[in-house]
Image (cartoon, rainbow, N blue to C red):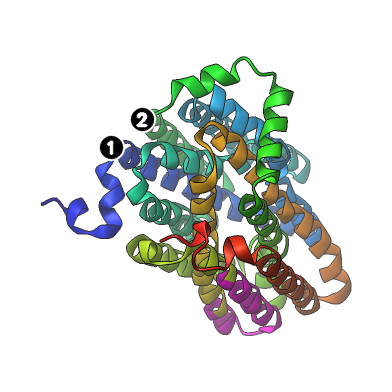
Amino acid sequence: MTLTARVAALAPFQVRSFRFQWPADLLTSWAFEMEGVILGWFVLVSTGSVLALAIFGSLQFLGTLISPLFGMAGDRIGNRNLLCLMRGTYVVVSSALMILFLLDWAAPAPVFGLATIMGLVRPSDITLRNLLVGETMPAEYLMRAMGVSRTTADTARIVGALTGAGLVAALGAGLAYVAVSSVYAVSLVLTLNVGLRRVRMIGERLAHDSPIKALRQGFAYVWSTPDMRALMLLAFLVNFAAYPLVGSLLAFVARDVYGLDQTGLGWLIASFAGGALMGSIAISIHGPSIRPARTMLACAVGWFALNLVFAWVTSPLFGALVLFAGGFVQSFCMIPMAVLLLRVADPSFRGRVMGVRMLAVYGMPLGLLLAGPLIEALGFAVTGTFFSAVGVACTLLIAVNWRVHLWRPAAAANVR
């Protein structure tokens, strides 16, 4: 008996495509995080403005506005082909940034411009990953596969953040970007080897529809399915009110609240990611025994509560511990959400549904743009309290309004 057959968490690796996709996704996520630390610190230091940092962070999610187009394109040309084109774009943009830093031409304006290009493409990467897992993975492995797949982003926030900060400190931004570009290139080569079971009739049927009609059908399908509509609202909520406090704004917390340098920022990012990794591993082992919708709602409330605590912490060590706990709970919210969307969606609409799901990520730049001025006016603690309170209240409203679909043990969304 092979190791993948004996260890439950490794069962998805029995699928050949997943053995290529997982390391490709892992390397891409590492490069994302390395790049985020390098550029986020550069923007904060070169401008000295938390508002500029918030705007820069929001640019990373600009592509959420056009994510349904990516979903539709994946339905038409194949999700693997689209993902390869996207990852080729990462190589080109990161190479341009590498040249700027190596030649000492880096300035806020060109960095913001290239970040805008990346921000148009990158938000849909996680969508394409999930779609490929849904297409290639047997149903009995899906929850475990999503948990294992999520570890790529979680480990990246640990390794990528610490590596990015360490490389900049040791070698400078230019040589650090040589590493980033190289990692993107290896990821692209691995992605070219991902295989998939694609239903040809889906693409053929879509070819006869206009893009506008296809998108309209996707939105109508999401809105007409009650549990899917609730999932989309919750996805928007956590991106608006939870992720900003533990994402781009951590650079401000590290420097202005805790008095840390970029290495300290890397450790804060790694703390949240370490908790998320533990949560992903726990789900990959015990995922089939949980009730997805109930777990998602309960852990969303827990995550907002931990963010409230984090907003008032002034000790770096205690803050890192709270971030670790928040990361763990976050996994038990987001992974069941992704599984439910793949489970509920009709295969012929799956790409467009996940594209609409990515629109919910636009809550993060909206949250960042609101948080920046609030922090400058009221401070991080008050701003964090406001966002956390809104998150808890709205999660409870969603749970009550869609209790038949999401909370009842007998609901389809709670089938183990």
Res. 161 in view: no
From the image, tell me which residue sits under label 1.
16
Tag 2: amino acid: Gly
The count of marks equals: 2
Q: Residue at x 44, y 37 (%)?
A: 132
Point out the image quarter for the C terminus: bottom left
Q: Residues within 10 Å of mark 2 (few under 14, many from 20)?
A: some
22 relative to 309, above or below: above
Q: Is residue 325 left or right of residue 300?
A: left
The quadrant in which residue 90 appears is: top right
Q: Earlier in the sequence, mark 2 or mark 1?
A: 1
Tell whether label 1 touches label 2 (CB within 8 Å).
Answer: yes
Could you tell me which residue is drawn at 57 percent across and 68 percent down?
407
Residue at mark 2: 195
**Which sits in the foreground, 247 or 169?**
247
Callout 2: helix, strand or loop?
Answer: loop
Residue 24, compared with residue 43, is above or below; it is: above
Q: Position of residue 122 (x, y in %)?
A: 60, 40
Q: Which residues are magenta?
A: 298-321
> What type is the residue that disc 1 sits on?
Arg
Distance from the alpha carbon under mark 2 to that under mark 1: 8 Å
Label 1 SS: helix
Q: Is residue 62 left or right of residue 152?
A: right
Q: Is residue 320 magenta?
A: yes
Residue that sits furthest to the left in the current view? 1
Which residue lies at the image location 66% right of the left edge and 56% below the top edge? 230
Q: Quadrant of residue 269?
A: bottom right
- Mark 1: few/some/many CA within 10 Å (<14, 14-19, 20+): some
Which residue is more in the foreground, 274 or 209? 209
Q: Quadrant of residue 319?
A: bottom right
* Horizontal and vertical percent position of residue 227: 62, 54
